[in-house]
Amino acid sequence: MYFLETPRLILRDWKDSDSRIFIEMNHDKNVMEFFPSLLTEEETFAMIERIKKFIAENNFGLWAAERKDTKEFIGFVGLSIPRFQADFTPCVEIGWRLAHKHWGYGFATEAANACLDYGFNILKLNEIVSFTSVLNIKSMNVMKKIGMHYVKDFEHPNIEDEDRLKRHVLYRKRKL
């Protein structure tokens, strides 16, 4: 089953065959550069199960992204609810994680725009946020391309104080 379709992508339920590629992605230093650590195989399987459960319970989530032309699983794009406490939570976040070889083609922007549309028009959300390390210029560029606006910097509560990734930026888009 798929949830959203764009000109080049399908955002769908996760398949068992996605696991191998997702494990590789979570071991890729390029993909995981702005996360505290690479994920083990076990951590990746646990993440997939959390994502699947969330989608089943909420009718939205971090959907598996598949290219229409090659039928390849390329990562995820979707909406989630952050599991940490901050002055802007609870909220709905838009996020993405794509395999490195699929960067630079506009897939994250294309899929994220479809997710924003779904969030505002189907889920009737009034705002959607996104956040990343202040070092992650590529993700901030996607946020800007999908019409999000900078709100503030904040200290991510789940990252150690001395970690270079502690400082994050928060972006937001409100329903028009």
Image (cartoon, grey):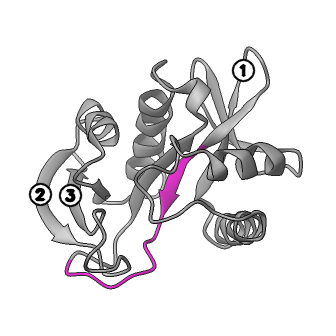
Dot 3 or dot 2: first in sequence order is 2
- Give above or below for 83 relative to 23: below
Q: Nearer the viewer, residue 131 or 157?
A: 157
Q: Residue 48 in the image: state x and y as whole percent.
A: 72, 63
Q: Residue 171 in the image: state x and y as whole percent.
A: 21, 53
Query: How far is the residue under mark 3 from the one under mark 2?
Result: 8 Å
Q: Residue 87 in the image: state x and y as whole percent.
A: 19, 81
Image quarter (top left, top right, bottom left or bottom right) of the C terminus? top left
Contact flag, marks 3 and 2 (Cβ < 8 Å): no
Numbered disc in front, either 3 or 2? 3
Which residue bears the numbered disc 3? Answer: 169
Residue 42 found in image quarter: bottom right
Q: What is the span of residues highlighted in magenta in the rendered image?
A: 76-87
Residue flagged by tag 1: what amino acid is it?
A: Lys
Q: Residue at x 89, y 52 (%)?
A: 16
Q: Residue at x 34, y 71 (%)?
A: 91
Tag 1: Cα neighbours inside 10 Å, few (<14), some, or many (≥20)? some
Image quarter (top left, top right, bottom left or bottom right) of the N terminus? top right
Label at residue 151 = 2
Residue flagged by tag 2: what amino acid is it?
A: Val
Q: Residue at x 49, y 56 (%)?
A: 79
Q: Nearer the viewer, residue 103 or 93?
A: 103
Dot 1 or dot 2: first in sequence order is 1
- Give above or below for 63 relative to 125: above
Which residue bears the numbered disc 1? Answer: 68
Q: Residue at x 23, y 62 (%)?
A: 168
Query: How far is the residue under mark 3 from the one under mark 1?
Result: 32 Å
